[in-house]
Image: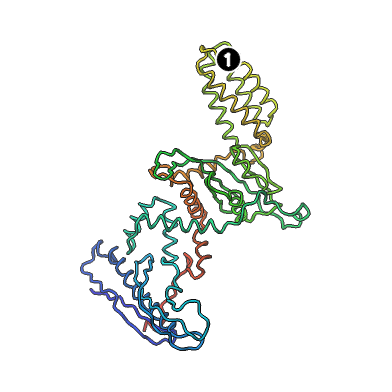
Amino acid sequence: MKMKVQIIIEYETGEETFTHDVACLTRGDLLPETLGLTLAEGKDLLAKMQKEMIDHQVAEYIQQSQHCSNCGSKHSLKDAKYISFRTPFGKLKLDSPRFYSCNCQPRLKKSFSPLAVALPERTSPEFLYLESKWPSLMSFGLTADIINEILPIDISKSTLHYNSMKVAERLEDELDEEQWTFIEGCERDWEKLPKPDSPITVGIDGGFVHAREGDNRKAGWFEVIVGKSMKEEKDSKRFGFVKTYDEKSKRRLFETLKSQGFQFNQQITFLSDGGESVRDLQLYMSPQAEHVLDWFHVTMRITSMKQMSKRLASHEEFKNIENKLERIKWFLWHGNVFKTLKVLDDMLFDIECFEDDLEYGNLPKFAKAVREFRGYIYNNKELIPNYGDRHHYGEAISTAFVESTVNEVVSRRMVKKQQMRWSRKGAHNMLQLRTKTLNHELRDTFQRWYPGMMTSGEEINSVPQALMN
């Protein structure tokens, strides 16, 4: 059995102008390996169909551009070259003649190339989208292997890296300027706003990425900030940035909130680990904002101190040390910062009496942890609510949901099973691509940049009846 695949070019008038055989497929006995198209046949078929399609598109456009749009006279040919253009189905060399500009009107250049004007970029939006989305989900090497395996085009890791970073920088350029406050208007203006939707809960946490500075592959680590904004009955939104690189972190958070329909009369709760950079990030976003210190990080520090206190509890002087830590946890659970600090001060007073005695082993290390914890509670005392009441009424008290977001946004792409080290700029750009992909916003962004780009669910127009006859 033989099957021919043809491509037919037809203008809007219905007049058939070109018919070309694209492929001829032969099949014998029905076997699993001969049923349908093979991958090689599919790649070859797509590449040939695209070449015929593009050749006629380009030829028609150049023919239309041969005459001056003002006086109608034909442009003189200067030279004929070609330009390269890449799509998901192959890299093509397109004939690109250059014409002399007409003398009937003022001209900025003596000559012009119609095709170069029509195609200022050398990669199709569809392919650029794939070059941005796939590397945001897996390594550049694995992405290159998959593209080369399933599409009729060869691409290198360096090309993938360059194009994906170019898209990320374009996303960055769209961000408005940073502001120290985003609260606008007054209470009278906020009361006139429509009734707000359900409250928004924002969790913010940090993670660490292997650093690279130039040729130095042992530059340590740097911190990235990751957050998740949740709203009932709507998709969650993720955001992320490199703390020591990003200059628009507050703007980035505000734009994330705006994408969820945030307004100034809407209740919003920020949960964070209490770090200085995170505290500053969430301030002055909304007059209805509530800021809460994450209970998970509080208990994690107390648990660490309990582990260190086990050896000390064997000494008579510190036999009640574990009970005091339990009291601290109980006071914090009920939002009593005053009594928490008082117990911590009493503990430090007892510790300092024996801190220089070598008999108590890890006492200096324990003393350092207690001092750091006291400073942590004191610096975040305004963020400590009555956790018990909040938990009773079903309100958020922990950023545990952000821990999974850190793993989703950072660890799976940049840390776990990845040997790659990142510059601060490269990691920041990758975070923008990855969060756009995970938020299902990357395709919408490309369609905004390229309005003629087909949506993912849009169907190809059915074959005209004239071609079926």
Residue 384, compared with residue 266, is above or below; it is above
Q: Position of residue 6 (x, y in %)?
A: 31, 77
Q: Residue furthest left?
A: 28
- Where does label 1 land, which residue? 318
Q: Residue at x 58, y 12 (%)?
A: 317
In the figure, is residue 292 to the left or right of 101?
right
Q: Residue furthest right?
A: 188
Name the one closer to the observer, 139 or 364. 364
Q: Residue at x 58, y 13 (%)?
A: 354
Q: Quadrant of the N terminus?
A: bottom left
Q: Amino acid at mark 1?
A: Phe
Q: Position of residue 264 (x, y in %)?
A: 70, 52
Identify the element where label 1 is drawn: helix
Label 1 neighbour load within 10 Å: few <14, some 14-19, many 20+: some
Residue 112, compared with residue 360, is above or below; it is below
Q: Residue at x 60, y 28 (%)?
A: 373
Q: Position of residue 275 (x, y in %)?
A: 59, 37
Name the one closer to the observer, 209 or 113. 113
Residue 199, compared with residue 111, is above or below; it is above
Q: Quadrant of the C terminus?
A: bottom left
Q: Position of residue 168 (x, y in %)?
A: 49, 56
